[in-house]
Image (spheres, grey):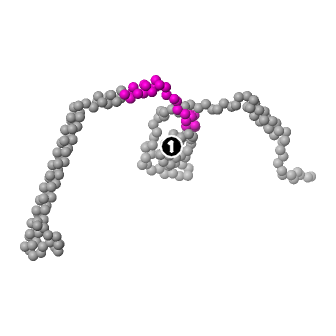
Amino acid sequence: MTKNLDFRRKWDKDEYEKLAEKRLTEEREKKDGKPAQPVKRELLRHRDYKVDLESKLGKTIVITKTTPQSEMGGYYCNVCDCVVKDSINFLDHINGKKHQRNLGMSMRVERSTLDQVKKRFEVNKKKMEEKQKDYDFEERMKELREEEEKAKAYKKEKQREKKRRAEEDLTFEEDDEMAAVMGFSGFGSTKKNH
């Protein structure tokens, strides 16, 4: 009764030779035929959602060992399954190459045609004209009157402040005279008031 005491692993050489030949034939077919087509990705486009950076602002969260990664501190990207610690790095991440590739987009932008540029200029020009129409003469006169009233109120306040200071100075002078009559003047001060 002898047992096989050889603990070395035995490889099936025939099976691995077949796998190697199969791989070689696939590589030859790729070389002979057209090379594998690169993955076609969409062109970069505008986001159709608002990036939420302020919903967790100022809130306190208790984090334990069992807390899921999406609820950990920071900003969670569900596309890339990663957590970014601050808002600036989160914006950099969602605008970056890795995130856009995971969304299925390349970093290339569609080239605008001449007609699209002209239309954009027309839209912007109309917006500027609407703003100018909204800003009419009567509103401007009203604003100027309000500014003048504020300036007058400020000047009056300054004059009142000067009067208060002058009255306070007079009361101090009277106190100095009273102190001189009583026999002490200025509490040892060397400053003279004339």
In which quarter of the view is residue 126 placed? top left
Q: Residue lying farthest left? A: 181
**Quadrant, the C terminus:** bottom left
Is residue 26 visible in the rendered image? The answer is no
Identify residue for label 1. 92
Does 93 sit above or below residue 62? above
In which quarter of the view is residue 149 placed? top left
Is residue 45 visible in the rendered image? The answer is yes
Q: Residue at x 8, y 69 (%)?
A: 177
Does 19 sit above or below residue 118? below
Q: Residue at x 56, y 42 (%)?
A: 81
| Depth check, front residue: 12 or 132 | 132
Q: Residue at x 53, y 52 (%)?
A: 64
Residue 110 in magenta stretch = yes
Does 80 sit above or below residue 32? below
Residues shaded magenta: 100-125
Does 15 sit above or below residue 136? below
Residue 177 appears left or right of 52: left
Where residue 136 sits: x, y (%)?
Answer: 25, 30
Residue 140 in magenta stretch = no
